[in-house]
Image (spheres, grey):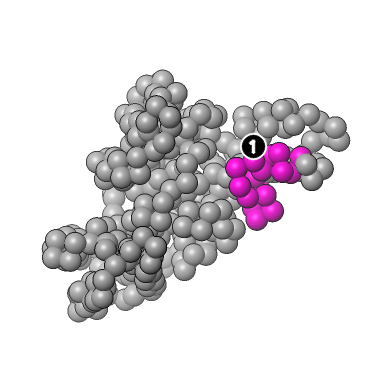
Amino acid sequence: MEVVITALGPDNVGLADPIIHHVTSRGARIAEIQMYDHDEEQLFAMLCRMDIPPDEFAPLSEAMRQVGEKTGLAIRVWSSERRQHRPRIAVCGTFVEHTPRAVLQAISDNVIAAEAAVVISNRKKLSKLADEFDVPFRMIGQESGVANDNEMVSVLDEFDVDYVVLARYMRILPAATCWQFAGGRIINLHHGLLPGFPGFRPYHDAHSSRMLTYGATCHFIIPELDAGNQTINQSTFSVAPGTPLDEIIAQGESQNEPRCLIEGVRRVVDREIYLHFHRVVARKPRA
């Protein structure tokens, strides 16, 4: 059973020691370990991926809970194999409805073999969409749209979420949130082709470059914004010379972006690929 442990807390010496000591004492095979010191935020972050027998998952989770209490670390023990049934997904969005709707519809149609646990937004607009699909809605933003990142983490824990899908969620997640759900649990849709067109206005940038092919990128989130090595899926469409920008954006938002995100989420949920040392790799079938 593949298990990911993440830990986040105040930067201090020796925080990783009790975690590593306990894991190795249980005879776990460690496949990946990463540690970070965010000096500006005075944070310690850690990720450890390992293989353990399935019956060790519950004891390991309890042991890490006790370590967290003693060290002050926020520790999460997670596995994509932990559920007998479907993984639970949080669908996050802001204004654009096409992409979160597409994910919810794909789940309803069994294209994505998952359960929609909650819709999260920093705006009220998507509440009706959540009601339409009978999914709980949580608004974590102020009237200005500024998101409460701590509240977002609390909601993800409240609904026991496996994967976080950013379906045109137009806020940058802070490093603290990224590391708490690290290891390939946060999936983002970028409405442009990476690495060529990062940033907030990829359609405009591509149009200014006189591009005739536009696209979208589904990728895992790590703290570096829109880093290209984490690409899960890309989808493109071509337009005729002289096509107005507003028509290009409309086609991208309504057709190409949903198609790209659905396939990306499906690949993750079906465990075809995973994130290993910040790179997407194909998962080897179990013997």
Q: Residue at x 57, y 36 (%)?
A: 258
**220 horizontally vs 175: left or right:** right
Residue closest to the eye, 202 or 241: 202
Helix, strand or loop under label 1: helix
Q: Residue at x 54, y 44 (%)?
A: 189
Q: Report the quarter where the C terminus lies.
A: bottom left
Magenta: main secondary structure: loop
x and y percent of residue 8 in the render? Answer: 29, 61
Quarter of the image for residue 85 reads: top left
Amino acid type of the residue that numbered disc 1 sits on in the rendered structure: Asn
- Residue picked out by circle 1: 256
Residue range (magenta): 192-207
Residue closest to the eye, 147 or 153: 147
**228 horizontally vs 271: left or right:** right
Residue closest to the eye, 153 or 64: 153
Does the segment drawn in magenta span residue 196? yes
